[in-house]
Image (spheres, grey):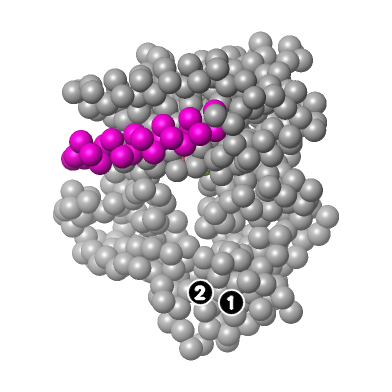
């Protein structure tokens, strides 16, 4: 059984939907299809959530959403029924915007319209491509806690809810990104969360393979926009890919791999517009294990340096520091410590809705027990591969190559799959090009 997820661009127009539908049609084992909202729609819905919009601005966005979907329907062979369903959803969307009480619940319900719209239309496109699917409301299966905007899925319940679909032999289509809490409120898994939904479904139904169909032909050795010589990676291990997705490989949502990895589900990343290209397969054990397989660059890193003499020969100090950050849901990436200071990096560019912010509240709380220094706009470069902590000469070569640049922090040794360091943002791309040439092209 294969779970196939199609991203926003893969369902962004009638032509894209047709491509994606023919992929589903080509393999009868593609039993569960999970899709995102059409590209641009979630951003539009997020914009509609802004209470300061003028009437004209609001109408402009609404019309854009309506047009995008109705245009696809016009091209269907038999769009009558789905036209009714979609117009009903669009009316519900307008009604939802009239609501005066606007809390977090309201926002999650608002952004969920994107996936509800796209799945209605894609059901018909699939039907016209000869694939009969049953449309499922993901909120009946994807049960989560009530942390709106970034809800935590409850795998046990999800497994139970999915069980009845597993043996049926039928084919299904459902929404990524959305779920519901125990009270039945609509929740969302965080921006880009459709990959995570698909991965959770794949684990829950014990699929053999999870396919992520997107607009690039797999995972590349590095970002091809920065390094044109970057090439697709055919096979990569979960451990390597996990480091890559966390450290800026944009193809995958960082948390996506976890459920698939847990469930022993193979993952394939491929392009829906070029389905014959192999893409990348993520497996437990790959055929080769190069020391350096890929490089990643992540911009907009904040460096937080915490200093206090209380730290000297003390216990519990770091625990206290991390507790404050945890209480504010701030995630830390790199850590380096000395006797009286700790440096941490925070990703301040996760995405528009999951933005990590050092609010004045956090700063005040931290300043009550330590001295703080906050510096912004660094780039984090990660080298991902195998046996990096046991390969002689890697750091020597690296430091030698980078002697003309200012390196602010290095993390080496805690992972066999990753060496990473922090540099000034303006040097990031140049360094990436240098490293790719040295370690991957040559
Ligand atoms: N539609 C959602 C978003 O744009 C989820 C996704 O595309 O994965 O964030
Ligand atoms: Mg997406």
The residue singled out by tag 1 in the image is 433
Q: Is residue 316 left or right of residue 417?
A: left
The percent coordinates of residue 222 (x first, y second) are 61, 65
* Residue 59 counted in the magenta span: yes
* Residue 283 counted in the magenta span: no
Magenta span: predominant SS is helix
Which image quadrant for residue 268?
top right
Tell which of 8 and 57 is nearer to you: 57
Q: Magenta residues?
A: 50-73
Q: Is residue 153 left or right of residue 239?
A: left
The mark tally for this picture is 2
Q: Quadrant of the N terminus?
A: top right
Tell which of 168 and 123 is nearer to you: 123
Q: Is residue 297 above or below residue 91?
A: below
Which image quadrant for residue 198?
top right
Q: Quadrant of the C terminus?
A: bottom right
- Mark number for residue 429? 2
Which secondary structure, mark 2?
helix
Write the residue at 73% across / 23% down: 131
Write the residue at 36% across / 43% down: 353
């Amino acid at each position: 059984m294969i779970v196939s997820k199609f991203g926003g661009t893969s369902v962004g127009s009638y032509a894209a939907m047709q491509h994606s539908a023919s992929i589903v049609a080509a393999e009868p084992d593609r039993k569960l299809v999970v899709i995102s909202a059409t590209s641009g729609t979630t951003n539009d819905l997020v914009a509609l959530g802004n209470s300061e919009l003028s009437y004209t601005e609001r109408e402009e966005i609404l019309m854009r959403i309506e047009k995008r979907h109705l245009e696809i329907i016009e091209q269907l062979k038999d769009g009558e029924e789905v036209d009714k369903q979609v117009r009903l959803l669009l009316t519900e969307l307008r009604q939802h915007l009239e609501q005066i009480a606007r809390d977090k619940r309201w926002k999650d319900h608002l952004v969920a319209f994107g996936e509800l719209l796209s799945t209605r239309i894609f059901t018909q496109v699939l039907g016209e491509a000869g694939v009969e699917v049953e449309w499922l409301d993901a909120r009946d299966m994807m049960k989560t806690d009530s942390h709106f905007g970034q809800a935590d899925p409850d795998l046990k319940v999800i497994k139970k809810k999915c069980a009845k679909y597993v043996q049926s032999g039928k084919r299904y289509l459902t929404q990524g990104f959305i779920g519901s809490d125990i009270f039945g409120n609509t929740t969302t898994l965080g921006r880009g969360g459709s990959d995570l939904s698909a991965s959770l479904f794949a684990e829950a139904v014990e699929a053999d393979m999870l396919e992520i169909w997107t607009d690039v032909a797999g995972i590349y050795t590095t970002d091809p926009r920065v390094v044109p010589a970057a090439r697709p990676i055919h096979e990569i291990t979960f451990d390597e890919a996990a480091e890559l997705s966390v450290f800026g490989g944009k193809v995958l949502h960082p948390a996506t791999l976890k459920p698939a990895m847990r469930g022993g589900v193979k993952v394939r990343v491929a392009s829906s517009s070029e389905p014959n290209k192999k893409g990348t397969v993520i497996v437990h054990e790959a055929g080769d294990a190069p020391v350096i397989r890929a490089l990643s660059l992540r911009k907009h890193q904040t460096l937080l340096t915490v200093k206090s003499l209380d730290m000297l020969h003390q216990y519990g100090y770091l625990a206290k520091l991390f507790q404050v950050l945890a209480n504010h849901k701030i995630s830390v990436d790199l850590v380096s410590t000395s006797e009286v200071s700790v440096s941490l990096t925070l990703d301040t560019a996760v995405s528009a809705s999951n933005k990590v912010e050092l609010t004045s509240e956090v700063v005040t709380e931290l300043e009550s027990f330590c001295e703080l220094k906050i510096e912004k706009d660094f780039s984090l470069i990660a080298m991902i591969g195998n046996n990096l902590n046991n390969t002689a000469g890697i750091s020597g070569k690296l430091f030698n190559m980078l002697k003309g640049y200012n390196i602010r922090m290095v993390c080496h040794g805690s992972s066999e799959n990753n060496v990473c360091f922090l540099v000034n943002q303006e040097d990031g791309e140049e360094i990436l090009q240098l490293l790719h040439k040295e370690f991957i092209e040559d």
